[in-house]
Image (cartoon, grey):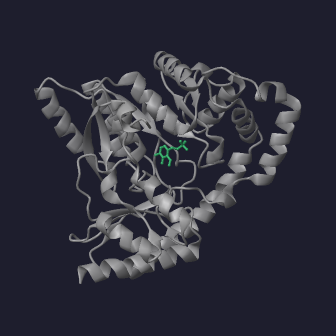
């Protein structure tokens, strides 16, 4: 008799949130669909020739170490290189031991949650917020409190009201998770005023902040901002970043920078999870940072994505129904559209895919529901002409449904 496998699956595994995006991408990959759904870099930004040369050299000169097991916290040399690079970007690192190297920043989010959150602890998130982080907070059974965004990022006045009301019940959040610069999914960037306010609130109400920062390296407009980590006087910010958008996501390299005591616990959690981040990736990326390949690549990244962003914004203006609203992102991979009420983007997705275009329904990004009339659109990956065509097809579909 074949066992009933479902009966063997653990309760935590059954509770794992399924990502709509992955399900959609699976469908999209099969057919001839324009995908505005994913969040992939354009492969033209991968510095292939340089990586080929570095990989050969790394294997020849350091093959014995690059192919060997390595420390859980990350290879010391790579952490030193990162500390210097981060320092130049205004992220202070006084000791490479304040850094842990992770398998993408996704693992850094998971390790932070495992290390800091008990079931029932309150974590403040942006609404809409980064889906894969919201999923992690669900897995560890934290209680999420979503704070709405506007064009200046998380509304810290609403946050303050919420903190006050929690405090009157004798409660407070332990953690606040934010993507303050070129947020995924909304594309907004938190103003300096809000950043200051947020740090004041963290101090007043005694919580920690996770600043997730994959996108601030390549901005399409000049903006006045400082990383929260740089403004943090009390050591409340754990800063996360990644090589995925500036080098290549396939290397699976991210890092967290924070107080040593917390990084020590994250190291312990990681040790039990995967022993360490691939040594070869760390050697290759370390050389790419050291030789200035990433810095040289950034202007190319900016010009390519800025052009695609502009194609998308122009097409939205031309084809989307009157009354739609979206953000002009100054960085990142996405814009987020609010359609007039009455359009349900989740219900319409199969029809959109039938007509040849995929997107991510926005409701996935709202921790407490809502957002039925919203969608996230990616401009980094599709070719410019496909972006135009995709937005035209979607605009026609949405206008038909509103008629
Ligand atoms: C805000 C944010 N955080 C984390 C990640 C995860 O990136 P990775 O695990 O490739 O470093 C992404 C990827 O899209 C992201 O947008």
Q: Is residue 236 visible?
A: no
> Outermost residue, right direction?
60
Q: Position of residue 61 (x, y in %)?
A: 88, 31
Q: Position of residue 402 (x, y in %)?
A: 24, 79
Front position in the image: 178 or 376: 376
Question: Which image quarter holds the N terminus?
Answer: top left
At horizontal 23% and vertical 55% (from top left) the residue drawn is 370
Q: Position of residue 202 (x, y in %)?
A: 31, 29
Residue 254 as seen in the image, left or right of residue 136: right
Residue 388 as seen in the image, left or right of residue 75: left
User: Would you identify the image quadrant in which residue 192 lies?
Assistant: top left
Question: Which image quarter holds the C terminus?
Answer: bottom left
Q: Is residue 26 visible?
A: yes
Location of residue 46 with respect to 81 vertically, above or below: below
Q: Position of residue 270 (x, y in %)?
A: 53, 23
Number of labelled discs?
Answer: 0
User: Would you identify the image quadrant in which residue 303 lies?
Assistant: bottom right
> Outermost residue, front direction?
1
Location of residue 338 with respect to 64 vertically, above or below: below
> Outermost residue, left direction?
168
At horizontal 62% and vertical 25% (from top left) the residue drawn is 276
Location of residue 340 with respect to 283 vertically, above or below: below
At horizontal 33% and vertical 53% (from top left) the residue drawn is 364
């Amino acid at each position: 008799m074949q066992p009933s496998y479902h009966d063997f699956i653990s309760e935590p595994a059954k509770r794992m949130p399924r990502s709509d995006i992955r399900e959609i991408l699976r469908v999209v990959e099969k057919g001839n669909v324009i995908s505005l759904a994913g969040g992939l870099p354009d492969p033209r930004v991968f510095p292939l020739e340089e990586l080929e040369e570095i990989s050969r050299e790394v294997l020849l000169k350091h093959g014995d170490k690059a192919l060997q097991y390595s420390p859980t916290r990350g290879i010391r040399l790579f952490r030193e290189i990162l500390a210097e690079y981060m320092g130049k970007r205004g992220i202070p690192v006084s000791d490479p031991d304040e850094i842990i190297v992770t398998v993408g920043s996704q693992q850094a989010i998971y390790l932070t949650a495992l290390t800091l959150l008990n079931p029932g602890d309150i974590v403040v998130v942006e609404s809409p917020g980064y889906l894969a982080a919201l999923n992690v907070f669900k897995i560890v059974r934290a209680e999420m409190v979503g704070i709405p965004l506007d064009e200046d990022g998380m509304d810290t006045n609403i946050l303050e009201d919420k903190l006050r009301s929690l405090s009157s019940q004798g409660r407070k959040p332990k953690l606040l998770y934010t993507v303050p610069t070129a947020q995924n999914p909304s594309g907004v960037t938190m103003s300096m005023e809000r950043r200051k306010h947020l740090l004041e609130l963290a101090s007043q109400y005694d919580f920690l902040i996770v600043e997730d920062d994959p996108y601030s390296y390549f901005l399409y407009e000049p903006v006045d901002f400082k990383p929260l980590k740089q403004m943090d006087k009390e050591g409340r910010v754990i800063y996360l970043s990644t090589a995925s958008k500036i080098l290549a996501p396939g290397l699976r390299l991210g890092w967290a920078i924070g107080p040593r005591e917390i990084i020590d616990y994250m190291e312990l959690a990681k040790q039990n999870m995967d022993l360490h981040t691939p040594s070869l990736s760390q050697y290759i990326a370390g050389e790419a940072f050291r030789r200035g390949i990433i810095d040289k690549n950034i202007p190319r990244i900016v010009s390519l994505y800025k052009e695609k962003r502009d194609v998308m914004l122009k097409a939205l203006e031309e084809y989307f129904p009157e009354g739609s609203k979206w953000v002009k992102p100054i960085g990142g991979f996405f814009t987020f559209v609010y359609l007039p009420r009455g359009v349900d983007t989740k219900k319409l997705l199969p029809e959109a895919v039938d007509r040849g275009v995929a997107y991510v329904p926005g409701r996935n990004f709202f921790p407490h529901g809502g957002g039925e009339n919203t969608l996230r659109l990616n401009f980094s990956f599709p070719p410019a002409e496909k972006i135009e065509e995709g937005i035209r097809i979607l605009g026609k579909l949405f206008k038909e449904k509103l008629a």
